[in-house]
Amino acid sequence: MGLFIESLDLDSAPGAGSTFNVGIPLGDPSGVRVMVEARLPEFAANRVVLVIDDEADIRNGREDIFRANGCAVVVADGIESAFDELADRSLDRSFPGVIVTGDTASERMREASRAGLAFLHKPAAPAELVRVVADLHE
């Protein structure tokens, strides 16, 4: 059937929908990776983190990561709304940043480097994102 699929069954009725049953073999539990909770070091907590992403699910997930680490989080869906969100806060406009993008063009990396920003490619694991933010606050 395939590399990991042992069986595939389909039950379908017009107007009633379809049900798929996929059989996969049990894996070797010794090969299971344990997720390590992403935590900022204490010195990096209590910081303000600005999360800008046009995808609400990604934005909300990152907000949750940083709030769980004790950060104040400002979220926005674009640069204009980020400026609007920051306008009412008395924050230094110069702070370290990380660009997390699906854009793999080398020019994007050079632009980020020239701007003094860290750069990660999507999908960025929470632990990796937290590590980079912590490094920025050292």
Image (spheres, rainbow, N blue to C red):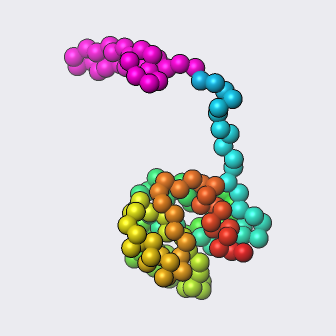
- Residue 72 makes an appearance in the image: no
Viewer-side residue, 37 vs 4 = 4
Check the image and report above or below for 126 versus 110: above
Q: How many marks?
A: 0
Quadrant position of the C terminus in the picture: bottom right
| Image position, residue 56 (x, y; %) | 44, 56
| Image position, residue 32 (x, y; %) | 64, 33
- Residue 6 makes an appearance in the image: yes
> Where on the picture, by quarter, is residue 38?
bottom right
Q: Is residue 20 magenta?
A: yes
Check the image and report above or below for 20 versus 135: above
> Where on the picture, by quarter, is residue 72?
bottom right
Looking at the image, the residue that sits furthest to the right is 42
Taking the spot 44% from the left edge, 21% from the top edge, the residue there is 5
Q: Is residue 102 left or right of residue 75?
A: left
Q: Is residue 106 left or right of residue 28?
A: left
Q: Is residue 108 left or right of residue 125?
A: left
Check the image and report above or below for 7 versus 59: above
Taking the spot 50% from the left edge, 78% from the top edge, the residue there is 113
Taking the spot 27% from the left edge, 18% from the top edge, the residue there is 16
> Where on the picture, by quarter, is residue 73?
bottom right
| Image position, residue 75 (x, y; %) | 51, 67
Quadrant position of the N terminus in the picture: top left
| Image position, residue 129 (x, y; %) | 59, 60
Taking the spot 60% from the left edge, 54% from the top edge, the residue there is 126
Q: Is residue 36 magenta?
A: no
Q: What's the magenta region? A: 1-26
Viewer-side residue, 106 vs 45 = 106
Looking at the image, the residue that sits furthest to the left is 14
